[in-house]
Amino acid sequence: VEVTPSESCGTRGDIRGDVGVPPPRDTFCITIPEGTSACQPDGGSPLACEERGVWFLLGTASVGGCAQGGPPLFTATSHYERWVAGITREAYFAETPPDPREEEEESTEHPETTVNPEIRGHPNATEHPGARERPETTANP
């Protein structure tokens, strides 16, 4: 898979249904092997990359590919880093996958400590200011 900047996405075909309108700057396209493509039902699917042994989320599938006849278009997650940080606040993201055996032991040792953070009144369920605001997007002129 090769990542290409949004400026070159529009030159490969009509990916948004609007002839001559380039995709937004917070997007990018990928070129993939012949015979494969991202399709409309794949929308929201992650495009994860590995660099020096570290996996990261590069983008999420948007439009394009088999249904639109152009290259698959992805939304770049880097443009929404502050917004995601506001939503996740102090969430813990493991650098290595957890050992499922340890999780099983913990859940049987302290079953009463399992709390759904979606429950109102839970101390971790308080909203961060601006967390529900929509992220700012950049639009091409």
Image (spheres, rainbow, N blue to C red):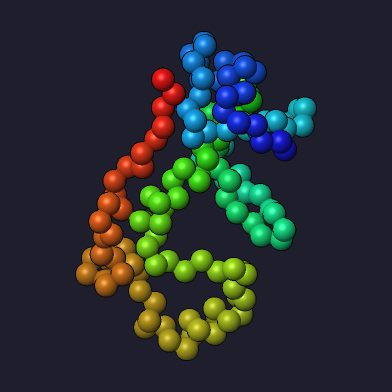
Residue 22, given in percent of the width and then of the height, sits at: 51, 20
Q: Is residue 6 visible?
A: yes
Residue 125 sits above or below residue 141 on the image: below
**Of 90 and 69, the residue lying toward us:** 90
**Of 99 and 16, the residue lying toward us:** 16
Residue 81 sits above or below residue 104 on the image: above
Image point 43% across, 86% down: which residue? 110
Which of the 4 image quadrants contains residue 10?
Answer: top right
Which of the 4 image quadrants contains residue 59?
Answer: top right
Residue 71, given in percent of the width and then of the height, sits at: 64, 25
For the N terminus, the image quarter is top right
Q: Residue furthest front?
A: 141
Which of the 4 image quadrants contains residue 112?
Answer: bottom left
Image point 45% across, 50% down: which residue? 81
Image-based side of 61 in relation to 34, left or right: left
For the C terminus, the image quarter is top left
Q: Residue furthest bottom?
A: 109
Residue 90, given in percent of the width and then of the height, sits at: 39, 67
Q: Is residue 67 visible?
A: no
Q: Residue furthest left?
A: 121
Image point 35% across, 69% down: which residue? 116
Residue 111, given in percent of the width and then of the height, sits at: 41, 83
Image point 46% across, 43% down: which residue? 79
